[in-house]
């Protein structure tokens, strides 16, 4: 598999989703919005999140991304394991994610095998990827293997704060009724954002 081309294709899709219209607003606060719409590529709905965080860009990058070396597991109880499989180049990598059960058990533990890439500039970080096959990781019968069509975080320094724009296009697989999943995910991600912001506050006080 050409992992570099695969991740570049994911980047193009993610940037397109960030600028798309016709999203349905699911949840809104002063600090974040969560929107949803149907994926054209997978049997799932996609989420778009926009967050304004009162924290430095690099701290946001280290703690919001779900990639090897991130600090996501320090605040997110849904994350069980993030494991680096292979470095493709100095920006691109293959990795494995285990989750715990999510949404009070509505979604059982999942596993994902993804390719990811990080692009950094002074005032913006772009982190993106998608699911791939990897010969070193056979599916574990204990877990349902989900498929990420595309995920992306665009993290930008803006007016003394940090703006995070995220796309999640994830087919959880399994036998979860779509209506249940659609009602659960916005609440799950809304709670995750609140947990993350509390973590950011504590980190900046320490």
Image (spheres, rainbow, N blue to C red):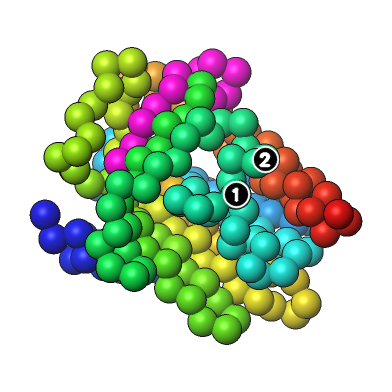
Q: Mark 1 points at which residue?
A: 71
Most extreme residue toward the right is 205
Please give the range of residues in magenta: 102-115
Residue sitting nearer the eye, 59 or 170 = 59
User: At 35% from the left edge and 40% from the top edge, which residue is drawn?
Assistant: 96
Vertical placement of residue 40 versus 104, above or below: below
Q: Name the residue under label 2.
A: 75
Q: Can residue 187 be seen in this view?
A: yes
Position in image of residue 122 (x %, y %): 57, 84
**Left or right of residue 48: residue 83:** left
Kindly indicate whether the residue at mark 2 contacts the one at mark 1 (C-beta within 8 angstroms).
yes
Residue sitting nearer the eye, 186 or 114 = 114
User: At 36% from the left edge and 31% from the top edge, which residue is drawn?
Assistant: 111
**Left or right of residue 62: residue 93:** left
| Circle 1 residues within 10 Å: few <14, some 14–19, many ≥20 | some
Residue sitting nearer the eye, 16 or 75 = 75
Position in image of residue 47 (x %, y %): 48, 47
> Does the magenta portion include 85?
no
C-alpha separation, residue under disc 1 versus residue under disc 2: 8 Å
Position in image of residue 61 (x %, y %): 59, 62
User: At 45% from the left edge and 51% from the top edge, which residue is drawn?
Assistant: 67
């Amino acid at each position: 598999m050409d992992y570099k081309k695969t991740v570049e294709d994911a980047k193009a899709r993610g940037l397109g989703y960030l600028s798309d219209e016709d999203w349905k607003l699911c949840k809104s606060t002063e600090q974040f919005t969560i929107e949803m719409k149907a994926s054209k590529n997978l049997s799932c709905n996609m989420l778009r999140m926009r967050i304004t965080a009162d924290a430095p860009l690099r701290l946001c990058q280290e703690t919001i991304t779900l990639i090897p070396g991130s600090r996501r597991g320090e605040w997110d109880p849904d994350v069980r394991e993030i494991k680096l499989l292979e470095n493709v180049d100095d920006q691109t990598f293959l990795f494995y994610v285990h989750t715990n059960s999510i949404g009070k058990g509505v979604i059982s533990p999942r596993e994902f095998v993804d390719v990811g890439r990080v692009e950094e500039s002074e005032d913006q970080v772009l982190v993106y990827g998608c699911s791939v096959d990897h010969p070193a990781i056979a599916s574990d019968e204990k877990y349902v293997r989900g498929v990420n069509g595309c995920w992306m975080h665009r993290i930008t320094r803006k007016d003394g704060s940090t703006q995070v724009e995220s796309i999640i296009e994830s087919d959880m697989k399994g036998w979860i009724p779509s209506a249940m999943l659609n009602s659960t995910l916005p609440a799950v991600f809304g709670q995750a954002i609140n947990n993350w912001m509390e973590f950011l506050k504590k980190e900046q006080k320490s």
